[in-house]
Amino acid sequence: MIRFLLASGADVNLGQESGFTPLFAAVLSSHPSAVEALLAAGANPFGPGGQPISTFVPSGDKHKATENLLREAEMNWRDSSS
């Protein structure tokens, strides 16, 4: 579904008033393939107030890949903003 929405031109950074974005939802729902697709499409890896979304990844070994993807995206986002 995410790939279909992205192919249809969905805004990956469009969030609710609270700042809750599709990437944030994918992280909280533990969907690493969705996280990867959203990041590849240019999703902002920072939440409201500039807090890294990686800080919201659930703990545990099975979430390490998601955390690593987010941390890399955060570094790249900061580098591209400089």
Image (spheres, grey):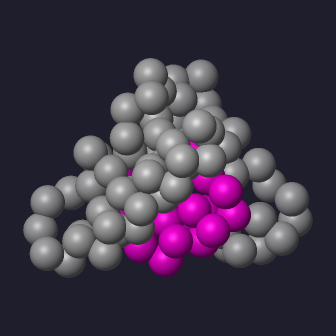
Q: Is residue 77 left or right of residue 49?
A: right
Task: Report if residue 34 lies within the magenta region.
Answer: yes
Range drawn in magenta: 28-44
Quarter of the figure with residue 61: bottom left
Toward the viewer: 74 or 61?
74
Residue at image position (27%, 55%) is 57
Quarter of the figure with residue 4: bottom right
Residue at image position (41%, 73%) is 32
How many circles with numbers are drawn on the protein?
0
Q: Is residue 37 above or below residue 78?
A: below
Quarter of the figure with residue 55: top left
* Rendered location of residue 18, percent (x, y): 51, 24
| Quadrant of the drawing holding the C terminus | top right
Toward the viewer: 56 or 70?
70
Q: Is residue 56 left or right of residue 29?
A: left
Task: Report if residue 64 lies within the magenta region.
Answer: no
Q: Is residue 1 above or below residue 70?
A: below
* Rendered location of residue 23, percent (x, y): 52, 53
Q: Is residue 81 above or below residue 73?
A: above
- In the current view of this chain or complex, which residue is farthest to the left? 60
| Quadrant of the drawing holding the N terminus | bottom right
Toward the viewer: 71 or 10?
71
* Rendered location of residue 29, percent (x, y): 37, 60
Determine if residue 10 is in view: yes
* Rendered location of residue 37, percent (x, y): 60, 71
Residue at image position (38%, 32%) is 51
- In the current view of this chain or complex, which residue is farthest to the right? 8
Residue at image position (21%, 57%) is 58
Toward the viewer: 42 or 62?
42
Determine if residue 25 is in view: no
